[in-house]
Amino acid sequence: MTTMSLKYNGDLRVECTHDESGATFVTDAPKDNNGKGEAFSPTDLCATAVAACAMTIIGIYGKKHDVDVSGMTASVTKEMSANPRRIGKIVVTFVMPDREFSDKQKTMIERAAHTCPVHLSLHPDVEQVFTFQWSK
């Protein structure tokens, strides 16, 4: 079990600490919801977590099957919905490194991304779109 500790610092900012490692970061409310937008918002973190988790699962696949995916990058776009205010859509674009990947490896990498626990934990009403850019 992992524990995190959080402290509300006022002005819509929350300091978050990963208790085991001591790593910290601050969240801020977005500009369109009374904040300054000077740090990740909680919903930004959720969308980012989808991409980071998928990349980690792809990395685990690569490690187990001797497929080098180092250098993979991703960009994430989050769209909010209203009534209720929530994440409506997360679009993740994975840019794979300039290497030769077999068709089987590409299929397995794409499948692996969709098994990430964060992706699977979000409500089905949150549309999640994964796109892969292969250089070769």
Image (cartoon, rainbow, N blue to C red):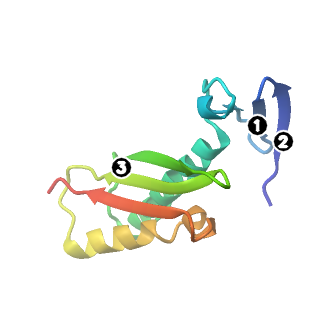
> Which residue appears at 49% of the width and 47% of the height?
78
User: How far across and how far down the image is residue 29, in percent?
Assistant: 68, 33
Mark 1 vs mark 3: which is more N-terminal? 1
User: How far across and how far down the image is residue 8, in percent?
Assistant: 84, 32
What SS does tag 2 mark?
A: strand
Q: Are marks 3 and 2 in contact (CB under 8 Å)?
A: no
- Estimate how packed mark 3 is, as few (under 14), some (14 to 19) or many (20 or more) residues with alpha carbons within 10 Å: few
> Which residue appears at 59% of the width and 62% of the height?
118
Give the farthest residue toward the left.
Answer: 136
Query: Which label is found at residue 5?
Result: 2
* Of marks 3 and 2, the one in the foreground: 2
Mark 3 vs mark 2: which is more N-terminal? 2
- Estimate how packed mark 1 is, as few (under 14), some (14 to 19) or many (20 or more) residues with alpha carbons within 10 Å: some
Query: Which label is found at residue 70?
Result: 3
What SS does tag 3 mark?
A: loop
Disc 2 residue type (three-letter): Ser
Query: Which label is found at residue 16?
Result: 1
Q: Are marks 2 and 1 in contact (CB under 8 Å)?
A: yes
Mark 2 vs mark 1: which is more N-terminal? 2
Give me the C-alpha separation between circle 2 and circle 1: 6 Å
Q: Nearer the viewer, residue 39 or 80?
A: 80
> Which residue appears at 39% of the width and 47% of the height?
74
| Residue 116 position (above or below residue 68) | below
